[in-house]
Image (spheres, rainbow, N blue to C red):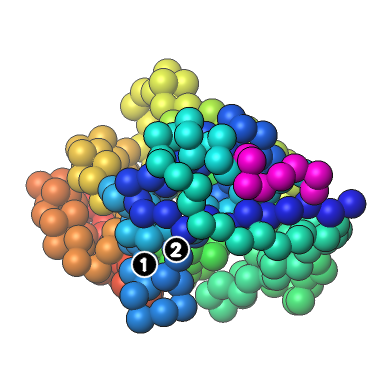
């Protein structure tokens, strides 16, 4: 079986409307790419994990619509353009997409990731390169956190560099649960994870079970009910700079006297303002930097 891809270059102002109209007119899928990719005019969009850039699309966009092989691209595009309020038939090209083993093709894009000195994040379809390492079996999924992003790596490396057998750990904004699992596999005692996304909680619980880690994951309200006054030896939060600043009193208040707070999801240029938000509660400084992102860390006085 084969399909037809239709490639249409459009300006930013028409991208969203035409994309939606193509789906309404029978496209099997629609994606948007940078039409200037690979040229001097390419303008990457920058955003923080979990947050789309404000502009939402490039200046020059390429819409890629997948159609059934027997569909007439010109007729589908004309109908979509009319529905989107675009005069005339936009210029387009087509290419044939042959049937492939999409599962195997997707899996081939994800290899084991080596982090720190002795941590491997390994997709379920791979064998671990080092059976004596700290191994996390983790497949790419809906929740943020597979070890590929610099902020996740920084937090994992901090946990590896500061083992605390028997310590209590809170992973706030846990996503896939990867940081909580690293802490647990490094010998932590009671470990909890919190996230506002119900799907992340489901993913984190599944990952913990797969990796034989006893960890409690909560939505914020459930966590508050179960741990109203609980403080932890280590609190780690890999979120975004803006919510981290807003949560400074709450996160600092979750750290035991003598305990550690680790924050990431922070660009290097944002480090000072985030540290300033925490200054009334705990002194933070840049522990490490990677690809323009930093991890901030500090200890609450005993």
x and y percent of residue 217 in the render? Answer: 55, 34
> x, y (%) of residue 248?
21, 42
Image position, residue 98 (x, y; %): 83, 60
| Residue at the image position 45 percent from the left and 45 percent from the top | 88
SS for tag 2?
A: strand
Q: Residue at x 45, y 72 (%)?
A: 37
Which quadrant of the view contains residue 29?
A: top right
Identify which residue is drawn at 33% across, 46% down: 13
Residue 76 picture location, percent across and down: 63, 40
The residue lying furthest to the top in this view is: 225
Q: How many labels, in total?
A: 2
Q: Which residues are magenta?
A: 69-76
Which comes sooner in the sequence, label 2 or label 1?
Answer: 2
Magenta span has 202?
Answer: no
Circle 2 residue = 34
Work out whether 236 lies above or below 293.
Answer: above
- Cβ–Cβ under 8 Å for marks 2 and 1: yes
| Marking on residue 286 | none
Q: Left of 249 or right of it: where is 201?
A: right
Label 2, label 1: how far apart the Cα atoms are: 8 Å
On screen, residue 146 versus residue 207, left or right, reads left
- Residue 44: give its label: 1
């Amino acid at each position: 079986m084969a399909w037809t891809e239709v490639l249409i270059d459009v300006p930013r102002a028409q991208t969203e409307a035409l994309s939606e109209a193509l789906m309404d007119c029978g496209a099997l899928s629609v994606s948007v790419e940078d039409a200037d990719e690979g040229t001097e005019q390419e303008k990457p969009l920058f955003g923080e994990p979990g947050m789309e850039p404000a502009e939402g699309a490039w200046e020059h966009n390429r819409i890629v619509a997948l159609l059934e092989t027997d569909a007439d691209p010109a007729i589908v595009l004309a109908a979509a353009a009319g529905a989107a309020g675009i005069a005339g038939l936009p210029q387009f090209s087509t290419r044939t997409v042959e049937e492939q083993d999409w599962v195997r093709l997707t899996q081939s894009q994800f290899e084991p990731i080596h982090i720190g000195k002795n941590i491997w994040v390994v997709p379920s379809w791979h064998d671990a390169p080092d059976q004596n390492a700290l191994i996390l079996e983790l497949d790419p999924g809906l929740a943020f956190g597979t070890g590929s992003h610099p902020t996740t790596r920084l937090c994992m490396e901090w946990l590896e560099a500061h083992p605390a057998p028997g310590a209590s750990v809170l992973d706030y904004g846990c996503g896939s649960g990867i940081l909580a699992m690293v802490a647990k596999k490094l010998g932590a005692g009671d470990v909890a994870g919190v996230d506002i996304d119900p799907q992340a909680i489901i993913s984190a619980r599944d990952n913990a079970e797969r990796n034989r880690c006893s960890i409690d994951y909560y939505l914020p309200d459930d966590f508050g009910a179960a741990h109203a006054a609980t403080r932890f030896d280590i609190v780690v939060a890999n979120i975004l700079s803006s919510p981290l600043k807003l949560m400074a009193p709450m996160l600092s208040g979750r750290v035991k006297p003598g305990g550690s707070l680790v924050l990431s999801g922070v660009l290097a240029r944002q480090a000072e303002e985030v540290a300033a938000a925490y200054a009334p509660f705990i002194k933070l400084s840049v522990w490490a930097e990677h690809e323009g992102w930093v991890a901030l860390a500090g200890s609450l006085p005993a």
